[in-house]
Amino acid sequence: MGRRELREQIFKLLFRVEFNPKEDMPEQKELFFQEKENAVSEKDGQYIAAKYEEIVSKLEMIDEMINGEAKGWDITRMGKVDLTLIRLAVYEIRYDDEIPTGVAINEAVELAKKFGQENSPAFVNGVLAKFA
């Protein structure tokens, strides 16, 4: 599985954080990998789960960074898809040295085109540009 597909799977798993209590997330993670559409190799599953856990462990700091940079937009006002994509990209920009900033932003915008609303790509790009 390529990096783009892995990133999409991480996004889908991370998206569940918005709809489930923290204590239910271990079960949600298990259910995620049981779904036919999310079937991946053991190696890819471990990578996805590890990245997800890393992001969730830093979620509070990531949200503070987003609130600090997204002038006029609090994370509570953002669409769930947009927020999840921004969280993923901010994690990649600030904490993942293997992924160049431009790639993190571009991939988030591409996922926004696929999963977001009409204005999502521009919104995600605008917020993430402040992290570049």
Image: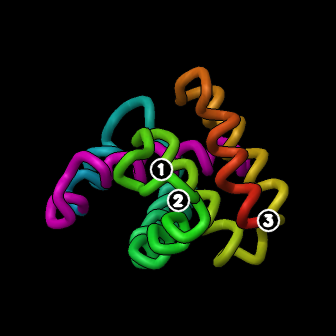
Which numbered disc flags the more N-terminal residue, 3 or 1?
1
Disc 3 element: loop
In this figure, which residue is indicated by the disc labeled 3? 132
- 3D distance between C-alphas at marks 3 and 2: 14 Å
For the record, the magenta segment spans: 1-25
- Judged by depth in the image, the label closer to the viewer, 3 or 1, is 3
Using the image, tell me which numbered label, if any, was put on residue 84: 1
Q: Picture coordinates of residue 70 (x, y %)?
A: 57, 58
Which amino acid type is marked by label 3? Ala
Instruction: State the residue in front, 120 or 85.
Output: 120
Q: Picture coordinates of residue 1 (x, y %)?
A: 67, 45
Q: Quadrant where the C terminus lies?
A: bottom right
Identify the residue at image location x=71%, y=45%: 125
Instruction: State the residue in front, 47 or 77.
Output: 77
Q: Is residue 49 magenta?
A: no
The coloring applied to the image is rainbow
As displayed, is residue 41 above or below residue 38? below
